[in-house]
C-alpha cells in the first residue's frame, strides 16, 4: 500500500477533506481555530513518540477504507477528520506514560484509558455541532470482541467509522518505530492484522485493509 505522497500539512491538500476546504468541513471554523487544532495535534505527535506523519497516514488509510465501503459526503468527511485528530486527547496524558519502555502498570493503563474521552471532550469544546466526529474519536480504541476501551463496546455497537479507524491506526502503529519496539516487518504486520480479525478488529473492515495491503483491491467491500 502506498500512502498518498506529498502532504505537508493537514489542511493544505486540495482534496484533503472529501472535496471541501478544511474550514467548511469543520463547520466554518475560523483559520485561527483550525491552526490551534493542528498545533495541538503536532504536540501530541511529538509527545507520543510517533514518527511525524502518523495522523496523516492514518487519514490516508482511512480514506482508502472509507471509499472501499462506499463512504462519501459528510460520512467520509467525518471519518477523515476523526482520523486526523483521533489521539488529540493524549495532550492530557503525561509523556512518561505515553513513552514508557515496557508494559504499563494497571494504574498507568487507567490513565491511558482516559484519552479517547478527553479527545471527545476537547473536540466537542473546540468544534460544537460535530457529534459524529466526537463519537468516532471516543470509540477509536474499542475492539470487536468488547475488550477495548473506554466503554467496552462490542461488534455493531461500534460505529463503522471507528471500526475503520481502529484497524488503520493499529496498522500504522505496527509499521512504525515506537518507544517500546521497532517497526514490524511488512510480513509481521500482515500476520498481526490476520491474527486480530474478529477479536481486536471488525472482520469486514480488517479483511478490506488486508486486501488493500496485499494489493488485491482498492475496492474491497
Ligand atoms: Fe488512541
Ligand atoms: Fe494513533
Image: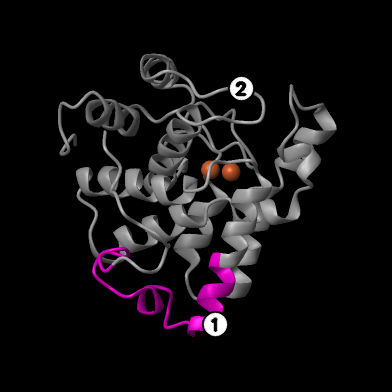
- Residue identified by numbered label 1: 32
Q: Quadrant of ligand 1?
A: top right
Q: Quadrant of the C terminus?
A: top left
Task: Give the x, y percent position of residue 180.
Answer: 66, 25
In the figure, 166 relative to 33: above or below? above
| Whether residue 24 can be seen here | yes
Q: Residue 214: which quarter of the image?
A: top left
Who is closer to the viewer here, 78 or 146?
A: 78
Residue under the image location 84 percent in, 33 percent down:
107
Image colouring:
one colour
Magenta-colored stretch includes residue 32? yes
State yes or no: discs 1 and 2 in contact (Cβ < 8 Å).
Answer: no
Residue under the image location 74 percent in, 26 percent down:
101
| Whether residue 127 can be seen here | no
Magenta stretch: give its range.
14-38
Magenta-colored stretch includes residue 179? no
Element on which disc 2 rests: loop
Would you call the spot at circle 1 few (<14 residues within 10 Å), some (14-19), or many (20 or more)? few
In the figure, 182 relative to 54: above or below? above
In the figure, 66 relative to 193: above or below? below
- Residue identified by numbered label 2: 181
Q: Could you tell whether 59 is left or right of 130 in the image?
A: left
Amino acid at each position: 500500500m502506498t500512502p498518498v505522497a506529498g502532504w505537508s500539512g493537514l489542511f493544505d491538500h486540495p482534496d484533503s477533506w472529501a472535496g471541501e476546504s478544511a474550514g467548511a468541513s469543520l463547520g466554518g471554523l475560523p483559520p485561527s481555530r483550525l491552526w490551534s487544532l493542528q498545533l495541538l495535534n503536532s504536540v501530541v505527535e511529538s509527545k507520543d513518540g510517533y514518527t511525524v506523519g502518523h495522523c496523516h497516514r492514518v487519514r490516508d488509510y482511512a480514506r482508502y477504507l472509507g471509499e472501499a465501503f462506499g463512504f462519501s459526503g459528510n460520512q467520509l468527511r467525518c471519518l477523515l477528520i476523526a482520523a486526523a485528530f483521533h489521539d488529540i486527547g493524549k495532550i492530557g496524558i503525561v509523556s512518561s506514560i505515553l513513552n514508557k519502555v515496557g508494559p504499563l502498570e494497571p494504574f498507568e493503563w487507567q490513565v491511558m484509558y482516559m484519552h479517547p474521552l478527553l479527545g471527545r471532550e476537547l473536540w466537542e469544546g473546540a468544534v460544537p455541532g460535530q457529534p459524529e466526529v466526537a463519537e468516532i474519536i471516543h470509540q477509536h480504541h474499542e475492539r470487536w470482541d468488547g475488550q477495548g476501551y473506554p466503554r467496552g463496546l462490542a461488534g455493531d455497537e461500534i460505529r463503522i467509522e471507528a471500526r475503520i479507524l481502529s484497524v488503520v491506526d493499529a496498522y500504522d502503529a505496527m509499521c512504525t518505530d515506537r518507544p517500546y519496539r521497532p517497526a514490524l516487518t511488512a510480513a509481521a504486520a500482515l500476520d498481526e492484522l490476520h491474527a486480530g480479525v474478529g477479536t481486536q478488529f471488525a472482520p469486514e473492515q480488517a479483511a478490506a485493509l488486508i486486501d488493500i495491503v496485499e494489493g488485491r483491491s482498492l475496492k474491497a467491500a
